[in-house]
Amino acid sequence: MNILITGGTGFIGRWIVKRLLQDKNQVWVLDNLANSSITNINEFRENPNFKEFIQGDIKDEELLSNIFKLNKFDICYHLAASINVQDSIDDPKTTFENDTIGTFNVLEQCRKYHVKVVFMSTCMVYDLASNQAGISEIDSLKPASPYAGAKIAAENMVLSYYYAYDLPVVVVRPFNTYGPFQKTGGEGGVVAIFINNKLDGKPQRIYGDGAQTRDLLYVEDCANFVVTAGYSDKANGHIINAGTGRDISINKLALLISNDSSAIQHVPHIHPQSEIQKLLCNYSKAQDLLNWEPKVSLEEGVKKTEEWIKSIKTTHKEDEGL
């Protein structure tokens, strides 16, 4: 198939590119590189099925129009977005314009050319898990940040095109995804940040009391889920979760990674109002509709991620001649 990935140089996007190329699809990537690097997809550039990288923004309607006009896409995996919760609280306008208006622009082109849309949403749209079965797709939403609000608005626009125009769409809500190629700084995920701190001999700084929990999904499991949702006609018109069905407190995660309780420091939360205390995924719908389930355990995923971060640090030192 001919497939467009917006946000394709990002952390999850580059793994989706990899899987799509493995499946012999023709792949185009659109990204403005605001929160990612072209180096994330360098290994794919010589693949004959990697058709083009386009540096551009989903807010640029003329650019989108030209891309869709020139290429007959079958699916658009739409990942381009502002993804930082704290940034959305400090600057809600940018997040709204990127995540909601940008999504509308993509939808309009997909409607014009009848291209299936796989919309990357987030578990941050949910209220906390209230039982041990975890959060399902019919559980309560709580837009506790402008990021979550913008994603919910975009989700509703995506689904409206399914009902109003019979456009094939699917909304995917992966839980907290981690793994190789995730940033290790402030914009990265908690696993990458903790591993980087451990390797640098820095303390593990935890917001609040650290009792908040996360359901941590390894990035290759996430990418396989997202790609499969695009391939499946049964997914059309649905919202689908992906996670592991296991949550871990941030305190226990820090201990798992650093193996040193003295390294843990608790600091005041910057935006406590946006914190979700318990995130636990019920992914039974993904099992039923897509025959999908996670394959990588947290312990194995942390090990793989640490090996990757170590390799990056080694390469960086070699480049600097250290």
Image: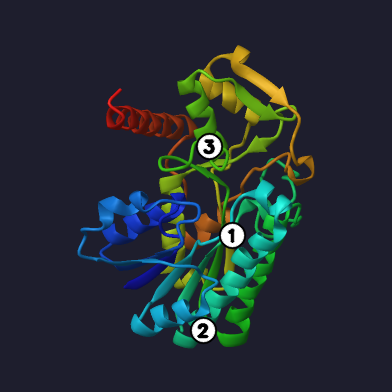
The 10 Å Cα crowd at callout 1, few under 14, some 14 to 19, many 20 or more, is many
Q: Which residue is mark 1?
A: 121
Q: Is residue 294 visible?
A: yes
Which mark is in front, 2 or 3? 3
| Residue 106 x/y as whole percent | 52, 75
Kind of residue at disc 1: Ser
Instruction: Decide which of tag 1 and tag 3 comes sooner along the chain.
Output: 1
| Apparent side of residue 3 relative to residue 225 in the rendered image (left or right) | left
Q: CA distance from mark 1 to mark 2?
A: 19 Å
- Does 224 sit above or below residue 65? above
| Residue 135 x/y as whole percent | 67, 50
Q: Which residue is mark 2?
A: 111
Foreground pick, 19 / 235: 19
Q: CA distance from mark 1 to mark 3?
A: 22 Å
Dot 2 falls on a residue whose secondary structure is helix
In the image, farthest residue toward the right: 273
**Which mark is drawn over residue 185?**
3
| Residue 202 x/y as whole percent | 54, 20
Quarter of image, res 320:
top left
The residue at the point 46 percent across, 31 percent down is 302
Dot 1 falls on a residue whose secondary structure is loop
Kind of residue at disc 2: Arg
Instruction: Decide which of tag 1 and tag 2 comes sooner along the chain.
Output: 2
| Residue 213 x/y as whole percent | 66, 35
Instruction: Decide which of tag 2 and tag 3 comes sooner along the chain.
Output: 2
Kind of residue at disc 3: Gly
| Apparent side of residue 313 relative to residue 213 in the rendered image (left or right) | left
- Does 93 sit above or below residue 11? below
Foreground pick, 282 / 154: 154
The residue at the point 44 percent across, 35 percent down is 301
Dot 3 falls on a residue whose secondary structure is loop
